[in-house]
Amino acid sequence: MMEILIYIVIGLVVGILGGLFGIGGGVIIVPVLLFVLTYLGFESNFLIHICVATSLGSIFFTAFASMIAHNRKGSVAWSFWRKLSIGIAFGSFLGSVLSISIEATTLKIIIGISYLLIALQTILNIAVTAKKFNPSPYTIFYGVGTGAASSILGIGGGSFTVPYLNYAGLKMVNSVGTASACGVTIAIFASLGFILSGVGDDQVLQKSIGFIYWPALIGISLGSLITAQIGVHIAHKIDEKLLKALFGIFILSVSYYMLFI
């Protein structure tokens, strides 16, 4: 019971962050869940992969709740979502299947460096001058890369889609709302890949569905559903420059954890 309560608390925090930043919460779920499972004595050569897979499974509920809340406020650009999701579906499934072959320590370093680059891009405001372009076939290709990277990192893709949508001329709040919708697509197809890849593997934990550890999935999802709309409400009230700064600082702190702790 205590274990489930820990996951619910994680979910409460994740829900706010997901609604606020459009990240689906995976940036915090993966390192925190890795810490919790290690502390509780779980052992597996695929422990980091299990954290990534479980993160993606729970992101579906966080991202879906955020998407609904943002859509009610008219902040989802469905034209961009349709093009991105075509590529995201393919990239997410492929990335989840391929990530199993990446050694655990290497995967942790990849995640940490990726977060660092995203944080620096956001904080330093590198190459974000709006071009105000419409979704195109190139958007689909960007979706493939976003889906593959997100499924490997265990995130909802907002770290990639938010800067891209900013560059396309969307306001920050619309970029966050659209990123939440893209996170739903990422979660569905990446989770499918991790479930199929983990079936019958003796390295997965008990109470797992493929590589997804369902007690953590349920607890985190319940908590995130409670608080997702709080994050959305804050995102619509906060200054855009401050929202970008908080977004960058948050990801930078998680990068430090993954690389050095």
Image (cartoon, rainbow, N blue to C red):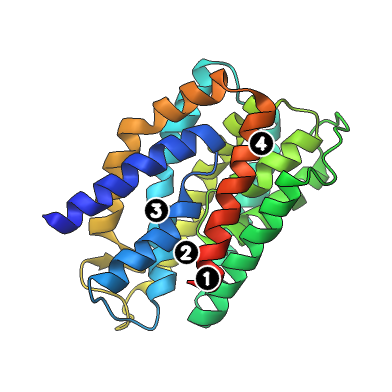
- Residues tagged 4 and 3 counted as in contact (Cβ below 8 A): no
Q: Nearer the viewer, residue 193 or 260?
A: 260
* Residue 4, x across and y down, in percent: 19, 53
Mark 1 or mark 2, which has the lower sequence index? 1
Mark 4 or mark 1, which has the lower sequence index? 1
Q: Which mark is residue 244?
A: 4
Q: Which quadrant would residue 236 be assigned to in this image?
A: top right
Kind of residue at disc 4: Lys
Mark 4 or mark 2, which has the lower sequence index? 2
- Residues tagged 4 and 1 counted as in contact (Cβ below 8 A): no
Kind of residue at disc 2: Gly
Query: Which residue lies at the image location 42% right of the left edge and 44% below the top edge?
Result: 60
* Residue 137, x across and y down, in percent: 81, 44
Is 243 above or below relative to 221? above
Which is closer to the viewer, label 3 or label 1?
3
Would you say residue 77 is visible in this rendering?
no
Query: Which residue lies at the image location 27% right of the left edge and 71% below the top edge?
Result: 39
* Residue 150, x across and y down, in percent: 58, 57
Mark 3 or mark 2, which has the lower sequence index? 3
Label 4 crowd (10 A; few <14 / some 14-19 / many >=20): some
| Distance from Cα at disc 4 to Cα at disc 1 | 32 Å
- Residues tagged 1 and 2 counted as in contact (Cβ below 8 A): yes
Q: Which residue is mark 1?
A: 97
Kind of residue at disc 1: Val
Is 207 above or below relative to 43? above
Which is closer to the viewer, label 4 or label 2?
4
Query: Which residue lies at the image location 82% right of the left edge and 38% below the top edge?
Result: 136
Q: Which residue is mark 3?
A: 57
